[in-house]
Amino acid sequence: MKKTTQLYEGKAKKVFLTDESNLVIQEFKDDATAFNNKKKGTIADKGVVNNAISCKLFTLLESEGIHTHLVEKLSDRDMLCRHLDIIKVEVVVRNIAAGSLVKRYGFAEGTVLAKPIVELYLKDDDLDDPLMNESHAVALGIATLEELEVLKNRAEAINAVLKKFFADRKLKLVDFKLEFGRHNGEILLGDEISPDTCRLWDLETNEKLDKDRFRFDLGGVEDAYSEVQRRVLELD
Ligand code: UDP
């Protein structure tokens, strides 16, 4: 499978068309951004680590009957994917209060939520990805109510699988972000699942092992990402 035209370059990945019209290659970069691009940097080998973690987690989800864009891991940084028509909604699932939930609603960081919270954000950097509800998404013509129901149910099912998987590896899945897209009349999970898009805390010490180390200059960023990779791949 060969990369042809570059379709898109995002903050953490490039996407290329391939010689097969319905397949693309996601190339994971080492670039890191936070606070909607206000903070920029690189994390050594992040692309390699996030590709390995994402491919493993998408394979796990497929084995649990959750359809994703993953076709196969091609190389260290490249993931072969089905070409999605991306739905411009970021679905965030939260099990423990952190980040914007703490800021917006006054939860104490670390509060275990009685029931997971599912939130929808508009995927639009120029608008700073605002929080929205279903009526906003429908009014914007981004998705139908039925599709949004699928997204939310899928996000909850993914949370159940991932929470257990990480707990078995002594990690708390605090929160994470998902993106979905349409492909041949089906909705598939797209993008990535990695320490860039999840908050993961050590089960015993609550040490942060995710992008918050970069966001808040906590140090040990590379070590945290490789520790997550080690635990995610350890039982392979
Ligand atoms: N998240 C992400 N991309 C975004 C916004 C959030 O991957 O553009 C992830 C983030 O890493 C965290 C979860 O979604 O795991 C919830 O993020 P939050 O709303 O707390 O926002 P933050 O202030 O961390 O961007």
Image: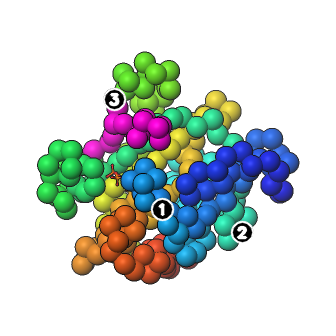
Q: Which one is earlier in the sequence, the residue at label 3 or at label 1?
A: 1
Q: Which mark is residue 75?
A: 2
Q: Which one is earlier in the sequence, the residue at label 1 or at label 2?
A: 1
- Whether residue 51 is visible to the viewer of this picture, yes or no, is no
Q: Against 142, is 188 above or below?
A: below
Q: Is mark 3 within 8 Å of ligand 1?
A: no
Indicate left or right for 235 with 161 as reference: right
In the rendered image, residue 140, in percent from the top left (x then y), is placed at 46, 22
Q: Is residue 9 magenta?
A: no
Q: Distance of mark 1 from mark 2, alpha carbons? A: 26 Å
Residue shown at 49% from the left, 66% from the top: 41
Q: Against 20, is 142 above or below?
A: above
Q: Quadrant of the N terminus?
A: bottom right
Farthest residue, direction front: 38
Indicate left or right for 19 with 194 as reference: right
Image quadrant assignment for residue 134: top left
- The residue segment tinted magenta is 117-133
Label 3 sits on residue: 133
Q: Distance of mark 3 from mark 1, alpha carbons? A: 30 Å
Crowd class of label 2 (few under 14; some 14 to 19; many from 20; radius 10 Å): few
Three-letter amino acid code at the position of disc 3: Asn
Q: Distance of mark 3 from mark 2, alpha carbons? A: 38 Å
Three-letter amino acid code at the position of disc 2: Ser
Q: Which mark is residue 40?
A: 1
Residue shown at 49% from the left, 26% from the top: 143
In the rendered image, residue 82, in percent from the top left (x then y), is placed at 69, 46
Image quadrant assignment for residue 26: bottom right
| 69, 128: nearer the viewer | 128
